[in-house]
Amino acid sequence: MRPANSYTLYWMGVTFLLFPILILLGIYMRTVQAGGLAGTVTWFYPMMTLHGVGMVGVWYVAAMACAADILGRYTEPSPAVRGLALGGTLVGVLLLLACVFLGKFAGGWYFLYPLPFKGEWPAWSAVAFLLSLTVLGATWLVWTLDLLRAIAKKYTLTQALGWHYLAGRDEPAIPPSIMIITVSLIAGVAALAAGVIVLVLFYQELFTGAASDALMVKNLTFFFGHTLVNLAMYLGVAAAYEVLPQYAGRPWKANKIVAISWNTVLLIVLFAYFHHLYMDFVQPGTLQYIGQIASYASAIPAAVVTIFGALLLVYRARMRWNLASLLFFLGLIGWAVGGMGAVIDSTISANVRLHNTLWVPAHFHTYMLAGLVFLVFAYFYHCSQEAAAEPERAGRQKLVSVLMVAGAYGFFLMFYLSGAYSVPRRFATYPAELAHGGAFSAIAAVFATVFLVGFLLYLAETGSRWYKAMQTAS
Amino acid sequence: MGIRLLIGACAVILSLAAQGAAPGVSVQESRLIDRAVPDIPLQLADGRSVQISELWRDRPLLVTFFYRRCSGVCIPFLEWVRNATREAGGIGGDYRVLALSFDDADTASDVAAQAAALGLRDSPHWFFAVANREALARITGALDFWHRYDPARRQYEHNALIVGIEDGRVMRALVASGVEGGRMRELVWELRGSFIPFYAVPGQTALSCFTFDAVSGETRLDWGMLLLMLPALLALAAAVGIFALGSRRNRGGMKTIAPGGAWITSHR
């Protein structure tokens, strides 16, 4: 039995509260696309904005909460900064809810410049949206810097990045999770700094009327958004490196290969976002090629090393399968499957066909929902169970996994099929020529509901442990 | 003649200043892009009658407006267009130029005299032409070419306009401020069939990542690229700074790892 950290438990509570609401928004959107709820179609884009920003934000902070909790096993992140991050996130969420529900702000999750200034929503809602991002970005940046400070308290930079492994030395032994978290946090500072610059440019236009170069702002926006999503995924993977060995009864050590793969991520991940600009013909061709190469180089080494390592860890091990180990394993599979979709999408010749279709939401839903969400859920369950030490019911835990996997993959399949059949993305309703898009949407809504049922069962399973853990939290 | 040129040059400068200050310049230009140009009848300086479409049939056409009795911007502007097209190259092979009088009082011999004054009478790539009132109204209306007759001065008030036309549609237009050399070069570059990735919007954006060099036809990095690199540099500085500060502290005071800690467990 190991008492849980109270802040980790608070983050779990926030996640458990917001996630089902955001799922319902997703089901609402698919229902509208299927031709249902026709009277509410004007809410489609505000809800798309809230669903997108909300999901990205919730899973980023959830992954950060896992990282902070892992670091808490080795070093001491500041409780005050953890509190600031939690408070700042709640304020940001309130501002976001206000601009969407009261102002019908619908600039999309990446608020592409100059859309926030050009929509039909009132100016104040665009300002509230920018303020929301400012509060979230600022507090997350402080949080990121504090976690780096905590790592620096125990390790040198070269140790934390595992450079001694590159030099052929095995000592000091560095947990792979520390290496991955360090890489992710350093890249996270860059992503959040890019976000700060974007916001400064928006405020500059707001207060002085001085316009910005749209191509430059789009580059910075995706530097911020794409990188942040990537890093959230990596933080979830760090949790798997940290915890899965406990269930396998074997170590998952860092070594030269692991160090090479994750240092490659640090070197390359900042350039991968260029693949979001393939459709921008004014972006110089050189950057487009860099985007394709960087997308491959940042995804493949780390994923191959991790998946291979996980398979070796589990192969013929005396695995103790429970909800945590199952979800960790499924999460790594989801990362691999979604990653394949992402690599295909980042291939220029394929992207030309797929970019504006539902293939894009297909791949990012795969690695977010079946990858990151499963990994974080695994970690949350693990923490709760470690603190609560309640007897586990294998049948119910398998049912939770089956429902979530069936719901998620059925839901993804409808996106992939829609993409393959050229159904465009970001359409609230489909014209007659794309009626098959509506049919796919209806089936997707059913599968999403199955996932939601699975999640509610997960919540029942984890929630009771979470509640018990709150009583003994440190 | 000298005084007339001086007045004309001043008019160009004042026009540029006024247009530079006006926020709607680029909007006015962009509104014209892809607009259909009416196929009007023309009478050329040599007396031939042609349809304007015959001039853009096999290659793009650069159209500008003037009138013979203009004591303002027309003549300096035509001289500038002549010089700019010579510098940019491609005239004849890649495009032709039409200088069309918008004063229906001008005759073919008037515009022929103007061509001669500019040293262009024998150029096979330059056309000076007049048109009837109805045809002029159609083309000036289609191209938003603003002009107004002032009977007191017996002069037209008007702006300066250059329009690139391909297959009967506007491919690009420059209004007065377009007489900057770089933008004229861009227009010529486009008339020659080359792809222009960036159009500068004068005075509207402080920083861009890339610019198009109309002289060399190359895309070049601009100061905004520094802004793209800044986040990575900040992250690097933050990481180095934080770990440098951390190394000064005593790393011996590390937290003891809980016995149940995952990593310890995994290394048993």
Image (cartoon, coloured by chain):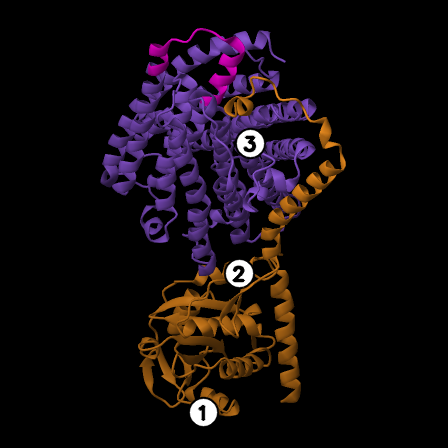
Let me know if marks 3 and 2 both belong to one chain: no
Q: Is residue B8 above or below residue A97?
A: below
* SS for callout 2: helix
Identify the residue under disc 1.
Answer: B121
Question: Looking at the image, do the residues carrying marks 3 and 2 touch, with CB atoms under 8 Å apart?
Answer: no
Determine the residue positioned at 47% across, 34% down.
A233
Residue A23 percent coordinates (x, y): 41, 23
Question: Element under label 3?
Answer: loop
Q: Give the label, 3 or 1, closer to the camera.
A: 3
The residue closer to the viewer here, A40 or B217, is B217
Q: What is the secondary structure assignment of the residue under circle 1?
A: loop
Chain ID at mark 2: B
Local crowd size for mark 3, using a 10 Å CA cut-off: few (<14), some (14–19), many (≥20): many
What span is in magenta?
A: A377-398
Please identify the quadrant where the N terminus of chain A is shown: top right
Chain B rendering hue: orange
Depth check: give the residue in front, B170 or B186.
Answer: B186
Q: Amino acid at mark 1?
A: Arg
Q: Amino acid at mark 2?
A: Ser
Q: CA distance from mark 3 to mark 2?
A: 58 Å
Q: Is residue B130 in view from this perspective?
A: yes
Given residues A116 and A259, the one toward you in this image is A259
The span from disc 1 to disc 2 (Cα, nearest Å) is 33 Å
Q: Is residue A393 magenta?
A: yes
Question: Which chain is represented by purple in the image?
Answer: A
Residue B77, label in figure = none
The label on residue A175 is: 3
Q: Visible in this render: residue B157?
A: no
Q: Position of residue B201 (x, y in %)?
A: 55, 60
The quarter of the image holding the C terminus of chain A is top right
